[in-house]
Structures are given as structure tokens and as C-alpha cells.
Amino acid sequence: MSDRAESTEELRWSTGSPAVERQRFRAIADALDGGVLQLDADGRIVTVTDDLLEIAGYAREQLVDAHVSALFDDDVLEREDEGESEDDPGHRRDLEAAIETADGRTVDCTVRLERLAEEEEHGTVCIVKYPRAPPRAGRESDEPDGRTRRLERSVEQLSSELDAVFDRISDAFCALDDGWRVTYVNDRAAELLGRPAEDLHGANVWEALPSLVGTHLEERLRTVMATKKPLSFERRVDPLDSWVQMDVYPTEVGISVYFRDVTEQVERERRLTVSERRYRTLAENFPNGIVALFDLDGEYTLAAGRGFDRLDADPADLEGKHFREVWDEPVAATVGPAYQRALEGEEQRIELEQADRAWLVHVVPVTDDGGNVVAGLTMAQDVTDQKERERFLQDAKAQLEAATEAGAVGTWEWRVQEDRFIAGTAFAKTFGVDPDEAREGVPLESFVSSIHPADRDRVERSIEDALERCGEYEEEYRVRDADGDRRWIVARGHVECDEDGTPRTFPGAVADITERKRAERKLQTHKRQLETLFEVLPVAVIVADGDGRLIEANETARELWGGDVFDAESIADYDRYDGWWADTGEPIEPEEWTMTRVLEGEEVTDPDVHEIETVDGERRIVMTHGMPVRNERDEVRRGVITQIDVTERREYQRRLEETIEKLETSNERLERFAYAASHDLQEPLRMVSSYLRLLDKRYGDRLEDDAEEFLAFAVDGADRMREMIDGLLAYSRIETAGEPLEPVELEAVFDDVLAELGGRIEESNAEISAEPLPRVEGDPKQLRQLFRNVLSNALTYSRNGSPRIAVSTDRQGTMWRISVRDEGIGIAPDDIERIFEVFNRLHTHDEYAGSGIGLALCRRIVERHGGEMWADSEPGEGSTFSFTLPAADEAYGSH
């Protein structure tokens, strides 16, 4: 409606009404010398007469759309109030002004300003008068006849412009004065009102059109006439039998009415509303998907469909939102280009995955009557099941094609009366018949002769029976193919007869079932093997059906129970079996038997241990496992349990537990003895050592050399004995005297040990390097002893020169391996295990000091921590002592 609105607005400010035009023409008539300017509400020049252009020296295009100030030396519109007569406020008088010409001259003139209506937006008419000048060459005389001709040209020019404006208006238009007389009516208005224009012009509208009296239209027109305020409305006018869109504007002398018949538009909108309701209803009931409309900006304006129950979205979540706000990035990236192409006029089909479903999306443009795209429509259908069926059909088709290619299936048509048997290539090859001849047709005997002799009579009888009955045919038999190999096939067909019952055609197909037959034979063989295995299994096997009826038990089960007692008809019969829980001695209730729970669907993988009473009254202990056997509907159709006689094993376990208990008791006694013995031996040894040192102190200078040497030997022996006792005591108390394991930073433990050994390290000029040590679960005190013993051992058995010791770490699952490498004297491979035995030394005390218990103590500490300790060495090549310790949980990711 843009063009119509622009034309209407132009008409409003340029004309107002025919009465206004008459006012303008009267003003022009008063201006015998000069020109006329028509201005819009902003003071811009809309129309200029030729006389004014000639005086000012401008071309028309230079002034049209320019502000009036471009022509006058000042803005005459600002002086408009000066031109109002004090005696007659409604009358305008002339204003003095000057025109600035194109060549820089100034032409004095007077200007009269006439408003076209009360509202400012209607614009202004400037009537310009200027002094007479001598007529220019080719110009008419300034005599009255010349002035008249110029005035006629101006009037003709303005009238032509007015007619052009009216021609642009496609609406009906009429003007009414304050006495309700029709002052103007165009042809379109006369056509809609059903009266000739000449009959309406000058007539009272209510008298000329009495059917309008008392209508809503009369009420609205009188309202505008009274209030001088415009109205726009759409109404059905019964006298005109149509819907009318009407715009009514007040003028100085009455009202201007623009109206047009919008019946077709209203009906179209009504049909559109009904159509939209139908469309929304259809969209909401779209059975297997969703429907959505989106505008040119990609925002959804409608969303519906039953498929929303398969998405993580609701229709209300879509409407009013951009598609990128609704869908995640992968979906938005897929549909975005399709939406854009649809808005460019192209239909699009895409497939995508959403909410674990497959969707086929069809996007189409929505166009108006002019073919312009105004929106997009998307229809998404859930094709998950269809995709599955398509994949199944494709697989089946591929298998069928592969089977056909491989000669596994074939078709035939036997034209009975002609005895012409037509067969496909695969069929012919299966029967050893030339494919080219089979395509043309051969006698039935050509194929029957290839059937195995043992099956031939049966097949022929079946064919004859089908011909007599005009019925179905199906047989399995053996044939010899073109390569002489024997194949099993199944043939199915149907005899087609005419109305008289005479066989005409016998179509059918064959399938190669050789592999199936082989599988069946193999299955039968396996079944026999399983049956044999079932009977000879060293465990008892019992099978029941879904109701609890015991249907099978092997020989081992019968031996275990002392006879064939497996004749229960249902679970209710299980109460006649005597049994007790082996751990508690409580009786087993019928619903607690393993078979009962298995038939309820339980998988008994953690075995039940029962004590049962056999047929001969003997008590036996059995360990029972059980599994349900389910069908394709996941229903339990069988129950299978296995039982193992563990009577002797349980007795052995009982004796073993007693032995272990006795050993633990013995170990505790030995540990107490070792502690007591070592503690009790300490005192006499301290006494011996003390007195030996006292003898040495008091009488050493009096003793002979041999006696002094003997005394030194005695003191040394006593010291070593005390050291061995201390080591033995520490060894025996590794388990009982240790602290609970806790997270320990080995780095701190290692630093403490280095500080303790600082004197020996400095004295021997040793170099000790270490990788960053991990965090482990351990006893800090015992770990310090472990490192102290290993490092002392490396310092003790170093070769000549400064010892070089390296400590490394390696993660091994849940354990850390710590390795201490030295460059010492090394150990012979055969002697490596000996060094970890208590008091077992490879060297004399004169060669290397020590008690011979240090490495044994280290291994005991490592074993208490759940690790292992070992050594790798070669004589003269140094040694590597390695041990493993459990990693602390939080240390796993940081090392």
C-alpha cells in the first residue's frame, strides 16, 4: 500500500479539496504579473511556474526540491505572520522581498503566502508579483490580452499537475463541504457508489445516497466533520454490499474521503485465517515429525507436530526464536545453509541426527502472489524406523544378489503343455544345464535327470501331485551341478491352471541349502558330542524347565545324590529335598534352592555351599552354580545348575585352617621366645663386655702381647654377639612392632638417611645421586631403616676410590620400583639369594664388618609393605638392589 499512501499524502497537501484549488486559482487571478511557487510543509519547492523560472534564470530541476530560501534573499516563511492583515486576520497581504537570480542579480518583488488548509502539513502557495519590465524578445505583451494568456498557461499547468496527482490515486475519492454537498467525485468513487459523477456533483450526499443514512459510515463522517480529526477504518457497508477501507480527512471547507473496495482482500484474509487454522491443525497432528515456519531472519513463527515428543524441545521453545538459539551447533550448522537456500527460492532436502533419531528434513520457500519469497517452511520426519527397514532391505537385497551370483538361488517357469522348462542362469548351473539353452527352454527331463537317483522318484511324485491339484509344490533333494559336485536344494513352486483345471504354467524358485544341510549335520554331531559330554562331565548338571520340572540330570548328578531322585514336577516339589546351609547349618527353604532362584532369573555365579543328604543317608557338601536360559523375548525357559562335591575339599580346608592357626600360634610363640631370648641374652653379654673392657683398662699394660690380643678378640666377639642379637630382635619384630602404613614422602625419608650417614659419606668421599622420589604407602621408621641398610651396604662394599651410588625410580602399575645402583665389588649370581638369608655372609669379619642380617631385614620390611626385593649383580661390575613399594593414591598423577 506504499504507493497508495504516498499518492494520498501528496493529494492531501497539494490539493486538500476542490474548494482549496478554487481558492488557489482565485489567488492566481489576482496576480496578473509574477509567478507561483508551490511549497510542501518543510518549505521545499514542489512546483514552479514558467514565468518565475524565466525571471529568476533557473532551470526547473535546479529549484524543484530546493528550499524556498534558495530563491529569496531571506526566508519569507519566517515572515509569514507579517503578512496577516490586522483588520482582517483571515486575509493575507503582500510582503516585500527580493529574488536572487541565477546570474547574481536581485529582482524586487512582493510575495503573498496562502496556506492550503489549517494543518501545516498541507503546504503553502507563494504568489510572487514583480514590477513590469519591458517585454523581452519573443515574449507576449504586458497588455491585458498577454497577461490573460500567461494566466491561462499557469492555470493550465497547475490543472495538469492536479490531474496527474488524481490519476495516480487508484482509490475512490470525493470531497464534501460543510453542508454535505459533493464538491468533487472521481470516476472510481462514482463506480463504487453506483451513480454517475454528474448526478453526484453538487448534490447532498444523504439525499443522493439515502441508503447510507443511519449507518456506521454516517456516524464516522459526521464525527470527522465535527472534530476536524482524521479517521481511518475498515467496515462492511451493506448498502454497497462490500467491505470498504476508508480514510477521512478534514479540510477548511469540509472533509475529503478516500475509500476503496477491500471485499476481496477481506475475503482473502478470512480464507487465509481459516487456512492458517487448518494448517496449524494439520501441523499439530503431523503424525511422524514436526512442521515449522520461519521468517526471512531465520526466526520460527510456527512450530507443531507430534514428533516433538521424540525431541528435547517443545513447540513453544521454537516460536519467536532464531533457529540457532534452539538447536545445538551441529544441527544449526546443517540446517542453516538449507534455510538460506530456501529463502533464495530453492527447495532443500537434508538428513540429520538429533536425539538419537534419524530425521529427513524438507525445506521449501513460501511465496506471495507475485512469486516473492516471504518465508520458509520446514518439515522434519522421523525416519529412524524407515532407515532401519531400508538397511535391512538393502542387506537382504545384497544377500539375494550375492546368492544369485553365487548360484545359491534361481527361478524357473515350466510351460506344462509345451513341456518347455525355462530357467535362470543360477538355476541352470545348479542342475548342470547349459544356461543359454535354459533361457530358451528345455524339456523338464533335462533338469529331472540331474536329481540324485535316491531322491528322483519322490520329486517326480511330488510334481505329479501338484499338477493334479493345481496346488503348491515344495521338496528338498540332491542334485549334481555342472562341476559334478553334489548340492542340496529346496524347490518351491505353484501350478497355475485354467478354468478347466488344465495346468498351464508351473513357476517356482530354488535355493541352495547345501551349507544349511552341512550345518544341520554338524549341529547333530555337536548335539551328540554335547550329550556325551553332558554324561561324562566330572560335575553334576541338572536342567529344569520354566515351571521347575526337573527334565534332565547327568550320571555325575545321580552319583552325587546316590540315585535318580530328579523327578520333581514343579518348584513346589523341592521341599522333599533335605539340605542345610554349610556355613550356618540352617535348613534350606524351597524358595532358597539355587534352581528356584535361577528360574526367577538370577545368575548364581557366587556359588551356594550346601550340605545335602543323599539317598543312603550320607551327608555331603556341594558347591552349586546356576544360570537361567532365556528365549528371544528374554523369558526364562530353562534353568541349569552345576554341583561339585567339595566334601573332601572342605575337610582339607578345615585341616589347613587349623594348621595355619597352629602356625600362627607357633610363630607368635617363636616371636615371643626370640624377643625373650634376645632380651635375656643382652644382660650377660653386657656383663661380659663390661668386665672385658674393665680388665683391659686395669690390667692391659701388664698383659703380654698374646693375652692382650686374646682380650681384644673376646671384646670384639661380645660386641658382634650383641649386634647379632639386636638384629635378630629387630627381624622378629618387623610385623608386631611396625607402625600402620600411611602416605610417606620418600624424598624426606631419603634426606634423613643421608644426614645420618653424612660422616661416612664425607669420609669416603662418596657421590650419591637420586631421581625425585615418589609418595608411597609405608611405615616411615621402617622405610628409613630400609634405605639406611641399602646405602650402608653400598658404601661398605665399594671398590677402591670414591663410591658412586645412583638411586632411580620407575612406576609399575600400583607400585613404585626403587633401584640403588653401586659400583662396588659385585656378587656372583649363585650367591645373590644367600645374601638375603639371616646371618649368611659372603665375606669374613676381617674383610668387611657386619652382622649378616641387614639385607634379610630389608627384604622382610619390603614384604611387610606388600612388595618384593631382589638384586642384580656381577663380580667386579657393581650391584643393583631393587625393591617395590605401594604408591599412595594421590601420588599417581603427580609423578
Image: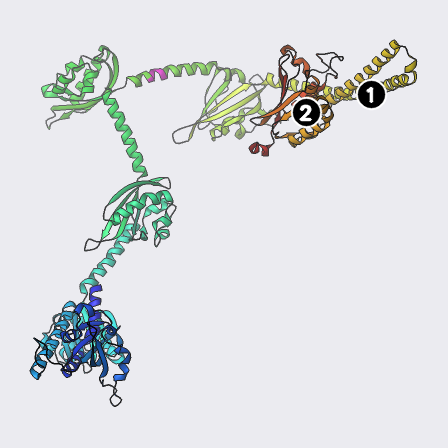
Q: Nearer the viewer, residue 390 or 466?
A: 390
Left or right relative to 26: residue 627: right
Tag 1 secondary structure: helix
Q: How would you rate the neighbour count of disc 2 (Cα within 10 Å): few for under 14, some for 14-19, many for 20 or more?
A: some
Report the residue at 47% width, 17% height from top.
Answer: 554
Q: Position of residue 462 (x, y in %)?
A: 20, 18
Question: Residue beneath label 1, please?
Answer: 682
Tag 2 secondary structure: helix
Position above or below: 607 against 107: above
> Magenta span has 460?
no
Q: Position of residue 426 (x, y in %)?
A: 20, 19
Q: Quadrant of residue 163?
A: bottom left
Image quadrant in which the N terminus is located: bottom left
Q: Nearer the viewer, residue 159 or 571?
A: 159
Report the residue at 48% width, 19% height from top.
Answer: 541
Residue 458 visible in image: yes
Question: Residue beneath label 2, please?
Answer: 787
Q: Amino acid at mark 2?
A: Phe
Position above or below: 413 against 301: above
Report the residue at 46% width, 15% height from top.
Answer: 535
Q: Position of residue 117 (x, y in %)?
A: 23, 78
> Where are the magenta residues, as a range?
519-523
Q: Please, which residue is most extreme toward the front here? A: 104
Q: Amino acid at mark 1?
A: Gln
